[in-house]
């Protein structure tokens, strides 16, 4: 089958995947969304995005983007599922195509996937994203991209339609390593913001005034400024990035740290707070709601 240069198969059209796919469509690419679940496909149809249950469009797509939840889903995407009759990307993609892994799954999972894809002549980019749904909508998503320079350049137009490329070098997996460092900082900063505003409340202070004062000085952080206002709203505030993402990502960071034998003193504290938030029923709520773990 002939590969179309402007055709993108986008596997995983969930909370962040769908707006990413729609942004690519708006940039002029022919995008086909793929998701095994009817809910995301129905939302894609309503938004005007062509979609399918099985990734058959990957046969003619020059670019295949994978935005799945974890390493096991990445493996399933590559291999398919015999029980459901779903073919794997490795059996569908042309050697002329490029596989762009944008999920946060850890360095080892991406390296294993890349080794298998490259053995079939398929180019691979490791490009996890940071910025959340708000970053997608604003076009300010940051892609921590690693892989062969010629492959990166060949898909620069695709990636820059989503935001800014951070070139992490030619070694596959380093994009994931950059993301691990990013998620270490994000998780710690979100919990620090929640803890500070909770302390303010216990001190009988107006939390909104404290937030305004702290974001105007040396104590400010991007996470305090972004998550702080949502921490002061109702528990069902609009979800920009869910608690469950940081539950998953702190686990990945811990595995990465163990592999290189470094003790991360703050990570276990942050991971425990997000796990506690999940246990309280906030798994799918905005990650600012880790604040609720400090409720009396």
Image (cartoon, rainbow, N blue to C red):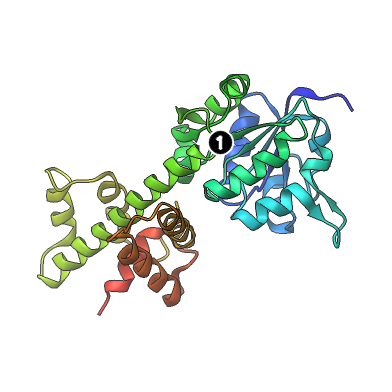
Can residue 42 be seen in this snapshot? no
Relative to the observer, which residue lies in front, 168 or 103? Answer: 168
x and y, in percent, of residue 198 in the image: 21, 67
x and y, in percent, of residue 244 in the image: 48, 62
Residue at (61% x, 54% y) in the render: 71
191 relative position to 74: left or right: left
Relative to the observer, which residue lies in front, 177 or 214? Answer: 177
Against 272, residue 127 (above or below) is above
Against 161, residue 232 (above or below) is below
Mark 1 neighbour class, 10 Å CA radius: few under 14, some 14 to 19, many 20 or more: many
Tell me where residue 81 sits by quadrant: bottom right
Relative to the observer, which residue lies in front, 56 or 296? Answer: 56
Residue at (66% x, 48% y) in the render: 12
Q: Residue furthest bottom?
A: 296
Residue at (45% x, 39% y) in the render: 135
106 relative position to 189: left or right: right
Against 243, residue 53 (above or below) is above
Element type at marker 1? loop
Relative to the observer, which residue lies in front, 44 or 140? Answer: 140
x and y, in percent, of residue 104 in the image: 53, 48
Tell me where residue 222 sits by quadrant: top left
47 relative position to 96: left or right: left
x and y, in percent, of residue 161 in the image: 55, 26
Q: Which residue in the protein does label 1 denote? A: 172
């Amino acid at each position: 089958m002939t590969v179309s240069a402007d055709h993108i198969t986008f596997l995983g059209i969930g909370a962040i995947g769908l707006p990413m796919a729609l942004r690519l469509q708006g940039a002029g690419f022919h995008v086909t969304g793929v998701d095994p679940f009817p809910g995301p496909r129905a939302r894609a149809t309503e938004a005007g995005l062509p979609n399918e249950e099985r990734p058959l469009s990957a046969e003619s797509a020059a670019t295949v983007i994978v935005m799945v939840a974890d390493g096991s889903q990445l493996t399933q995407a590559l291999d398919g599922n015999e029980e459901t009759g779903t073919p794997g990307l490795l059996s569908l993609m042309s050697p002329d195509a490029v596989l762009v892994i944008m999920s946060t799954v850890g360095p080892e999972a991406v390296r294993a996937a890349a080794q298998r894809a490259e053995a079939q002549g398929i180019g691979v980019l490791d490009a996890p994203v940071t910025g959340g749904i708000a970053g997608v909508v604003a076009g300010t998503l940051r892609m921590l991209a690693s892989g062969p320079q010629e492959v990166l350049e060949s898909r620069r137009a695709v990636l820059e339609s989503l935001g800014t490329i951070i070139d992490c070098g030619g070694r596959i997996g380093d994009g994931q390593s950059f993301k691990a460092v990013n998620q270490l900082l994000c998780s710690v900063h979100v919990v620090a913001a929640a803890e500070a505003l909770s302390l303010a409340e216990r001190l009988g202070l107006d939390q909104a005034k404290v937030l305004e004062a702290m974001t105007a000085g040396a104590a400010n952080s991007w996470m305090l400024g972004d998550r702080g206002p949502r921490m002061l709203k109702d528990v069902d505030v609009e979800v920009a990035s869910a608690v469950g993402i940081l539950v998953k990502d702190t686990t990945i960071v811990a595995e990465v740290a163990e592999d290189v034998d470094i003790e991360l003193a703050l990570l276990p504290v942050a991971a425990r707070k997000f796990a506690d938030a999940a246990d309280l029923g906030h798994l799918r709520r905005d990650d600012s709601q880790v604040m609720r773990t400090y409720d009396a």
